[in-house]
Amino acid sequence: MRQAFIDAFQHHWLCQHVIAGKTLNVGCGKHPYPGAVNIDPNPGRQPVPDYAYDVHDLPWGDQHFEVVLSNHVLPALCDIDKAMCEMIRVLKPGGHMAHVVPNWAVTPKRLGSKFPWERQHQGWHSAEELRAFFEQYPRLEVEVCEPFPRFDWSFRVVAFRRWEARCPSANTLTRPLT
């Protein structure tokens, strides 16, 4: 299966989750979603994101968005736990996250990446590992965590924000931070 088809398929799946003006697209890179608030820490991207913000320190208030999206962003984050807490914080109760995450059991590591943190990524090798990662956040309830149909290069995850519970501190996470 050609990479361009897979990218388009994943992009289409994420586009289905966009609610105009109420969706945050984290790490949009070169693929902003029409109607979403597109952020990327690199202001030199073309097309230019709406904001050059870092997901580790979002400027919006609590419970601002109904949807948070990302496409192959989570493994590249410097501090994934802080970023997850920020995404959960700006997500309204009852809102949902939709993420496309590489399956590192079949995707080669990007050792040649220009971003040093991608070489020390958090990788998931099964849907069970990825589900366990999301379930460590008490505010999230995972609805879907599975490989994409017809190819297993990536997982798709949909998680809803619960109405109560606090985000864990780094001291209370169920897995050690690396």
Image (cartoon, rainbow, N blue to C red):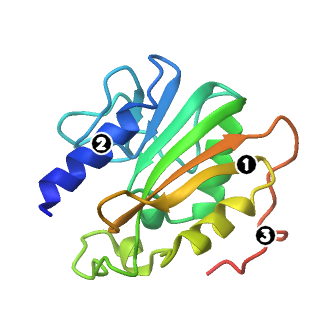
Tell me what residue is drawn at x 39 percent, y 46 percent: 27
| Rendered residue at 55%/58% (across/down) | 145
Q: Secondary structure at mark 2?
A: helix
Amino acid type for the residue under numbered disc 3: Leu
Q: Is residue 18 left or right of residue 80?
A: left
Please name the amino acid that badge 1 sits on: Leu
Task: Report the quarter where the C terminus lies.
Answer: bottom right
Mark sitting earlier along the chain (2/1): 2
Which residue corresponds to mark 1? 140
Callout 1 secondary element: strand
Instruction: Classify mark 1: residues with Cα within 10 Å, few (<14), some (14-19) or many (20+).
Output: many
CA neighbours of label 3 inside 10 A, class few (<14), some (14 to 19), many (20+): some
Real-space Cα separation, disc 2 to disc 1, in angstroms: 23 Å
Name the quadrant containing residue 92. Answer: top right
Q: Left or right of 5: which side holds 87?
A: right
Q: Can I make out residue 59 in this image?
A: yes
Which residue position is annotated with label 3? 173
Q: Answer with mark 2 or mark 3, whichever residue precedes in sequence.
A: 2
Q: Is residue 1 above or below residue 7?
A: below
Q: Is 104 positioned to the left or the right of 3 in the image?
A: right
Q: Nearer the viewer, mark 2 or mark 3?
A: 2
The residue carrying mark 2 is 11
Q: Residues within 10 Å of mark 2 (few under 14, many from 20)?
A: some
